[in-house]
C-alpha cells in the first residue's frame, strides 16, 4: 500500500509568518498534531507540532506565558518550527513510513510530490488501515 492511498489531502498549511496563536487554534479546531510550513512555491519549509507550540509557555501555576512583554509581537511559525522535517514521497510504501514514524516517534509526516507538499500521513491514518484489515480478517486463535 502506498502513502497516497491513506494520507489526508490536500494538506492544510501555514506560512512562516503565521502567528503561533493562529496555528494553535488551527490544530485544536481540526484535531491535527502538526501543520506543515510552506514557502511561496508550496515547498516544505518546516513543521510545527503541538509540542513546539507548548514549549515552555505553561507556567507552574497554570497560566500561559505570552512572551517578553505586552508590546512584543506574537511569535510566528518560523520561530518555533522544526526546519527541514522528515518527509516522504507520495509513492512511499506505507509499511516503511509506519516504521519511520515508530522509530522517530513522529505522529505525522508531510507527504511530498516533486518537492511540493500534497498531504500528511498520520499515525491515525496507519491505524485505520490496521483496524480495517483486522475487521476484514477472521480472528486468529
Image (cartoon, rainbow, N blue to C red):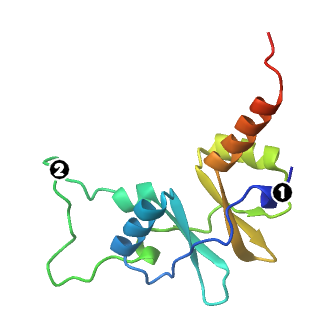
From the top left corner, tell me how far across and down residue 127 is, in percent: 67, 41
**Lateral position of residue 109 relative to residue 33, left or right:** right
Above or below, 128 relative to 121: above
Q: Residue furthest top?
A: 141
**Mark toward the start of the polypeptide (1 vs 2):** 2
Q: Do callouts 1 and 2 mark residues in contact (Cβ within 8 Å)?
A: no
Q: Position of residue 102 (x, y in %)?
A: 66, 40
Residue at the spot 24% in from the left edge and 54% down from the top edge: 58
Binning the other alpha carbons within 10 Å of mark 1 as few (below 14), some (14 to 19) or many (20 upward) gives: some
Q: Which of the numbered marks, if any, corresponds to residue 62?
A: 2
Tell me the quarter of the picture where residue 45 sits. bottom right
The residue under the point 38% across, 62% down is 53
> Residue at coordinates 17% horizontally, 47% vertically from top-left?
60
Q: Which residue is mark 1?
A: 92
Q: Is residue 12 above or below residue 41?
A: above
Q: Residue furthest bottom?
A: 40
Q: Is residue 21 above or below residue 29?
A: below
Amino acid at each position: 500500500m502506498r502513502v497516497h492511498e491513506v494520507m489526508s489531502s490536500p494538506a492544510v498549511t501555514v506560512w512562516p509568518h503565521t502567528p503561533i496563536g493562529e496555528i494553535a487554534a488551527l490544530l485544536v479546531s481540526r484535531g491535527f498534531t502538526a501543520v506543515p510550513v510552506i514557502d511561496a512555491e508550496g515547498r516544505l519549509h518546516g513543521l510545527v507540532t503541538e509540542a513546539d507550540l507548548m514549549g515552555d509557555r505553561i507556567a507552574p501555576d497554570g497560566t500561559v506565558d505570552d512572551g517578553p512583554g505586552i508590546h512584543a509581537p506574537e511569535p510566528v511559525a518560523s520561530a518555533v518550527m522544526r526546519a527541514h522535517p522528515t518527509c516522504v514521497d507520495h509513492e512511499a510504501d506505507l509499511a516503511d513510513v509506519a516504521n519511520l514514524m515508530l522509530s522517530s516517534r513522529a505522529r505525522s509526516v508531510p507527504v511530498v510530490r516533486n518537492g511540493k507538499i500534497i498531504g500528511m500521513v498520520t499515525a491515525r491514518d496507519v491505524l485505520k488501515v490496521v483496524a480495517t484489515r483486522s475487521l476484514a480478517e477472521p480472528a486468529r486463535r
